[in-house]
Each structure stands twice: as structure tokens, then as C-alpha cells.
Amino acid sequence: MSTSSAPALLRVALPVPLRREFDYLCTPPLPAPGCRVTVPFGARSLTALVLSHPSESEVALGKLKAITAQLDNSPLLAKAELKLLAWATQYYLHAPGEVYFQALPTLLRKGEAAAYRSSSYWYLLDEQATVPEQAIKQQQALTLLRKGPLTRGELQVRGISSAILQALAKKQLIEKREQIPEPKDWRHTKQLTTEEDKPHLTTEQALAVSLIQSAHGFSPFLLEGITGSGKTEVYLQVMEAVLKAGRQVLVLVPEIGLTPQTIARFQQRFNLPISTLHSAMNERERLDAWLSCRDGSTAIVIGTRSALLTPFARLGLIIIDEEHDTSFKQQEGFRYHARDLALLRAHQLDIPIVLGSATPSFESLHNAAQGKYQLLTLSQRPGTATVAEHLLLDSRRVQMHAGLSPQLIELLGQELTKGNQVMLFLNRRGYAPALLCHGCGWLADCERCDAHFTWHQSPSRLHCHHCDYQRPLPPSCPQCGQAQLIGTGLGTEQVEQALMGLFPQYGIIRIDRDNTRRKGSLAQHLEGIRNGQYQILIGTQMLAKGHHFPDVTLVAMLDADGALFASDFRATERFAQLYIQVAGRAGRASKPGQVVLQTHQPEHALLQDLANQGYQHFAHSALQERQAAQLPPFSFQALFRAQATNAKQVHTFLYELVQQLQPQLPATVLCLGPLSAQMERKAGQYRYQLLLQASNRRELAGACRLALAIIDSLVSARKVRWSLDIDPSELW
């Protein structure tokens, strides 16, 4: 451009599902990369993120439009974040705008100012305030507020409901005030930790802490510790050195449900600002937390998958707890894996990263075996805690009572009589997985899915857990008219009802998605368990992960045989991880624990291996099988998924893609499909998939780019909804 006032080019990312960036004109001075602008896009006005200032455009200058406004004076995302997102765009072959905007809170995507807004904070009015002993939740709220004012959201994530706060306000013990959060520099905090006497480390823990603290630059560690071996204590002591140096720490957890207990543990140790980032927060809470991370005014960030993409002022350490968990893989839209991107982010920032798990993913074990990660092992529980005893109960030829064998009922009674807690695990909610007519054999099937309705008793309804469609329970069979409708199979509601009859004198709590929907309800249930309010715990997978219940001495898995014969090659790995995680809830304190697995396949090699040899031995054998079959992690996969309400349209699209793609693929790239999904029809959509596999990532990426170019030319692609998943964690 000849003059400084002449329009120059901006290259921006737009939040649209198109695999390209866009050029616009802008009068200098130009906004820096990482700033937002508003631009015309068709008939709409969209928020865009500036990526660069190109010298030329593929589009003629006369056809380019000008931006309409500049929203930021300084970048929201620094060069490091932009570099990470640019890499992710190329690796996952996803629309740039959807990738970049994943790193921004919803309010910033909508064009709001990147500034704190006044929030409602609860303040303690009297440091000596007390409430009756039976008001446990009110006591907890006062304890939290003695450390300083907190927002409603911060209190709710710790299990304090609005009703508790209102009750304390009526007693004039607390009050709500509006204020704008002020960024604080925590680096000069005199008393970093709140605990004077830290737990005594085992030799293995001390070695792990020493090795991580002595690492320089990018150093990936795989901390493989049996359940209850003290991985969290290793995290805490490693974090302390990083925090003393004035650097921030990011801790990723797989589930929102694990956030409250993680916060509580970290608050107990550190006298520093801690922020959370997860989907249960409202838009304003999320933006304020995002700003505090970027400004450096929070020391520790605890969050789920998306927290990884948050900008930090001085990030010095990344910890991924339960790194094997599939929740770290995004299954919709931008299908990234938080663990893999975290490793890249740590590499770009030249900082250490710790992946922790009792049951590491096969990918991580393979990387450790190749020397890419340093493996640290915790094989013992600290103190007097011992590893639980494993028992396989043969459920063949015995009279079952709502899925409970007589031997299991006897074992439950023995532990309850001793004053202990017991946990029963069943990964099927509802009363029964299907509703059957005893007269004619009719089954209640979902009209929109290739699946049965699940029968729920509380409240009474039929519910499809795949498409979420619900309908009332029919009074009689719609096929034969007889009123002989019965449930078939086992669900958590049925187990709960049976145990109420068997052990009426004990408190029973069921924890699944149905009774933890209300915000803060899960935290309340978990608190009731720790307080001894409940002796019998029944739950699905959300109860199996990471929770510490010192009085649980017996854990039983009621029905897991289905996982032994699943079609997905990852099914055995997932089952083994779940089994070990569930087993880890037993005997975590001074009381010895027992793990019981009811099965119709007690001789199955997988069960015998897990019960007698443990996860490490199983994983070693299973990895050898994967290598022989050339399955991940010894190869790499990409999955094209397609769906439409018309099955023929899906067939046409994928077959046309294969016909053009197959002849152009190198012999080293395997193309499988089209294949129907295991559940072909879901929510009214027919679903098929095409799998590409190669032993080399570069060749697989080339094949995917070739496929995408072909798809762009197919008319049939416009009639279906399709997606590309690089490194898929599951098949349909």
C-alpha cells in the first residue's frame, strides 16, 4: 500500500463450519493477531478473530469487504495460544474458526468486552458466627467464607446451595454484595501452604516428586499409581515448587463431579486463589475465570477438557488426572483430545507435564515403553492401607434376587454389621433396560432408534437413553392388550428397591445421572456418604472415578459380562480400566477392602488376569495382541462418519467417496467400509462410517486431505451430515 491510510489486509477466523480462513480490508493501524473484529458475512455480522496481516489475497481486492469494528485494543490470545490452535487446525483437519473460537468463552464469541463485570459475592459478617451442630451445610458455608468472599457459583460447586445461603442471610450471618473482581498478584503471598504437617511420603512418592521437580524444560511424566497410592499428594508437592516460583498450574480432571473434591483438597493445602473451568458454570462465571487465568491473578486452575485451551500469563506445569479417561476426547464438533493437545502445549511452553492414572491408556504406556515419557510407579498405598482382595463370584445356576446372588447378599450383610459402607456398581440406570409383554413377547422399542426403551419407575416413564425421547408407561400391551408388562434386565433403580427390602435399617443412596441433574446435588450426595449418612452406595460410572470413601470396605460389580464380548477392539481396555477404578474405591484407609465381581464367565482369561495379576500385567499382554493385529497405538486411524434421515443418501455419499478415494490411496493406507454403526439408526438418523488406518501419521493425514478434497466435489455430500474424527476413541 502506498500510504498508511490505505486499507490493508486482515486474515481472520470466523465461527463457521468451513475449512478456510477469510480476508477483509482494514484501515491502519491494524489490530494485532489475537484481537477480535466484527465483519460482514453474507447478510450477517459476525465476530472474527484476527490471525495475521497477509501481504496479498487470493480474492481480488475489489471483491473484499471491510471490517465494521475493532473490539479489542490488545490480543485476547497470545502467540503461544495461536500457535497451538493453528497446529490443532492442521492436525485435526477441522474448520479453523471452530477451532480458534473453542478457546474463547461464549460471551467473547458474542462480541462482549473482555472485562470483568460486577458479580454477587457472599460475605461473612461475623468471624465468630456459629450455627447448630446439625446444620452441617451451614457450618461448611461459614468455614468457606471465613477464607474470603465467594460467588454463588463458587459456593455451589462446593456443594452449598442457594437455600443454605438464604438461610444464613436471614440469620444475618452473611450478606450479598456486588463488586468487580480486582486482579491480585498472589506471587508475594507469605504463607503459600496452609498445612504445616504434610503427609509423610513413601519412598516411591518421594522419588516421583524429586524426579519431576528436578526436570528442566519439557518433560512428560507418566505417573502410574494403584488406586489409593497417593498420586494427588505427589501432584500437591510438585505444584508447591512451581507456585513458589510464581508460575501457574493447570490441573485437568475428566468429570465435573471430581472438581469439588479436588478444589477442597487443594484449598486445604494452598493459601492461593484457585479457579475452576467447566460446563456447569454460567457464561459470566466462565469469562471471569478465563480472565483471571489470562491476567495471572489465579494461581491454580482446575477444569475439565476445555480448560486446556485457556490462555495463561505464566503457566509452569500441567497435570492431567485420570489421563486414560475417554472424557478428555471431544466427541462433537472440534474432536480434539485434551491429553494430546496438553502434551503439545507443554512442549511449546517448555514446561513439565504429568499424566496420572491407576490404569494408564495403552497410548501412554506405549509412549513410556518407547522412552517418550518417563514412567514413575506407585505400587503401594501409604500408611496402613492395603490393596483390596479380589473375588470372582460365579452367578451361574444360582437364584438371583434383583441381580444379587445369595453369596453377595451375605457378604454385604457382614460388612454392614461391622459398621462399614458397601458400594454396588451397575452401569445401567433406570429400573430395567427393557419393557416386555409376558403374554405376546412385545418389546417397547424407541421409534427413533434401534434400541429398547429403558423403564424408569421414579418417575414412571419409558426413556430412550440414546435420543432422550420419553413417553408415559402404557397401561397394557399395545400389541395384544394384556396387562402383563414386565421389566427385563437390571437397572440401578431395581437394585436400590431390592436393597431397601433386604437392609431396611441402613441408609441407601443411588448416584446416577437421573438423581444428580440439579446443580450441586452430586456434591451433596458425596458429602452425605462421607458423613456416614448412607451405608449402601449404588451407582453408575460417575461413582467409580476418583472418589475417596474411607469407610467403604466392599465394592461389587453386578453385571459386566457384556464388555467381554463387545465388537470394539478397545472394549477390553475400557472394561479393565473401569474394573480397576471401581475396585479402587474399596479399602482406601486403614480398613481392609474386598472387591467382588459377579459373572457368568468366571474362567474368562481377562477376568482371571485382572483379579490375579492386576492391570499392568493385563495391559502388557493386551498391547502385544494390539501389535500383532497392527491396531492403535501401533497404527493410526481416522474415521469419516455420515448420517441422514434417508439411509440411501448416506450409502450413496460414502460409496461415491470410496470409489474415488480407494484407487488413489497408497498400499500402506487401509480403507475399511462403508460400515453401518453398531446402532444403525439413532434419533431418526441412519449412521454409517468409513475407517482409514495407516502405520504412519503423515500418510494418514495425506489420505484424509485427499478424501476431504473429494467430498468437496460430491453433490451427495450436501445431503448428509458428515464429520472427520482423527484418532477416534470409539466407533459408532
Image (spheres, rainbow, N blue to C red):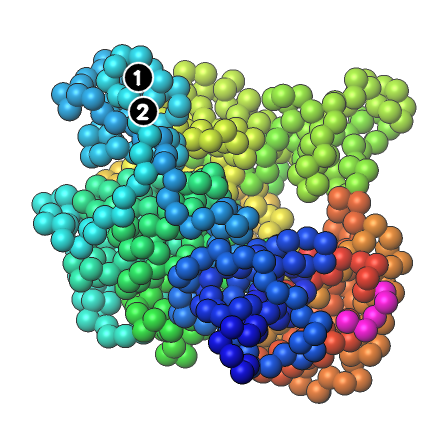
> Marks 1/2: CA distance?
8 Å
Mark 1 or mark 2: name the one nearer the start of the chain. Answer: 1
Which residue corresponds to mark 2? Answer: 176
Quadrant including the C terminus: bottom right
Vertical arrangement, residue 287 with respect to residue 576, above or below: above
Nearer the camera: disc 1 or disc 2:
2
Magenta region includes residue 714: yes
Q: Is residue 591 left or right of residue 23?
A: left
Instruction: Give coordinates of residue 629: x percent, y percent.
Output: 61, 75
**Residue at 80% over, 33% down:** 443
Q: Which of the pair 426/296 is nearer the observer?
A: 296
Q: Which of the pair 101/687 is nearer the observer?
A: 101
Name the dominant secondary structure of the magenta segment. Answer: helix
Which amino acid, by three-letter code, is at mark 1? Ala
Q: Residues within 10 Å of mark 2 (few under 14, many from 20)?
A: some
**Residue at 72% over, 54% down:** 43
Residue 479 seen anywhere in this rendered image of the structure: yes
**Residue at 31% over, 34% down:** 179
Quadrant including the N terminus: bottom right
Magenta region includes residue 7: no
**Residue at 81% over, 64% down:** 717
Vertical arrangement, residue 684 with respect to residue 121, above or below: below
Q: Which of the pair 628/279 is nearer the observer?
A: 279
Question: Do residues under tags 1 and 2 come within 8 Å of each other at their CB atoms?
Answer: yes
Residue 415 seen anywhere in this rendered image of the structure: no
Q: Secondary structure at mark 1?
A: helix
Magenta highlight range: 712-716
